[in-house]
Amino acid sequence: MTPTGPRPYANPYVAGTALGLVLLGAFVFAGRGLGASGAFASVAAATAHAVAPASTASNTYFAGYLADGARPWTDWLVLELAGAMAGAWMSARLAGRTALVIERGAGVAASARLAMAAAGGGVMGAGAVFARGCTSGQALSGGAVLSPGSWLFIAGAFGAAYVTAPILRRVWR
Amino acid sequence: MTTFALPLVIGVAFGWTLERAGLGSARKLVGQFYLRDLTVFKVMFSALVTAMLGLFWLGRLGVIDLAAVYVPQTFVAPQSLGGVLFGVGFVVSGLCPGTSCVAAATGRLDGVATVAGMFAGVLLTGLALPSIWTFYESTPRGAVTLPDALRLPYGAVVFGVVLAALVGFQIAERLERRA
């Protein structure tokens, strides 16, 4: 038997068109687009509420996720993102691409890579709160319905990323 | 049924396509910002254009009512600042919220760290937000669209975005050949 490694990724235009059809399906059948950071906000609101119910109820931002009848632990986006993790795992598993690894550039140690991932995630989380969404909810979904705020988000995110990238060139070598 | 099954089914398809495209790999994603691998741009804009054209034609043919499709509210200043913070975090972590979940689900520990950091970031920002609420809700424009804001026909803006994407794909292919 010949050793088989991970299978190559799909053609980006084919995968992108498929992703667009998934997004279109969400618009048609659910009346809303895809999202990711909103699920984090919902779980954060639920967590804050579990720890400190009174002060969380008076927090205008989190209160929006905890309105009467809301189920922040199983919000639409939380379920969607849980499904996304299951779908990603199935896809990777079938293609031999699951692996317990730390992806990093040659210029950085594993521990530093994990610290940067966490820090970058934190900054992104703050950005997603102010932007009211992320690459999924704003760039993709808001972009497709031609929301001006979404296109401002795309311009800001790509612009800042290209300005920051040269500073981190050694990290991602 | 639809409250639980629909988001799960849509989510599975979402995660599946992101993983197939290679967007669960931080090294592949950052290639976008060093112009080595423009998969992020190609996947994102193929998807955006597909969904945008689908909505436009389904609306025009009367299959769906576009008024029932959610359009996010625009807040010029906080969303611009949010985009800038997001872009910096994207290059530092190498992943975005959705793709960090794909990375984590497929065993990438950098994905797990990004997910943990993002949760902390959203939680802390959320806790601090009431004290900067004026800024958070500043420069509101309502649930408008680009055709409204630019006073252009819907079809003209759709055509412009498709054209820009096609030009972008050509440039992306050239940049990758050069890299």
Image (cartoon, rainbow, N blue to C red):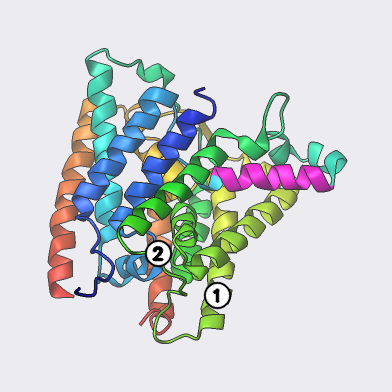
Residue B67 position by quadrant: top left
On screen, B57 above or below A134?
A: above
| Residue B152 visible in the displayed image | no
Q: Quadrant of the C terminus of chain B?
A: bottom left
In-image side of B76 versus B36 (left or right) = right
Q: Residue B72 location in percent, x, y?
A: 48, 33
Identify the residue at horizontal 12%, vertical 65% (top origin): B174
Magenta segment includes A41: yes
In-image side of A89 versus B44 (left or right) = right
The residue at which mark 2 appears reads as A98
The residue at which mark 1 appears reads as A114
Amino acid type, label 1: Leu
**Helix, strand or loop status at disc 2:** loop
Q: Residue A85 location in percent, x, y?
A: 47, 50
Amino acid type, label 2: Thr
Give the mark nearer the N terminus: 2 vs 1: 2
Q: Residue B30 location in percent, x, y?
A: 36, 68
| Region in magenta | A38-51
In-image side of B51 versus A99 (left or right) = left
**Residue that extends furthest to the top in the rendered view of this protein:** B62
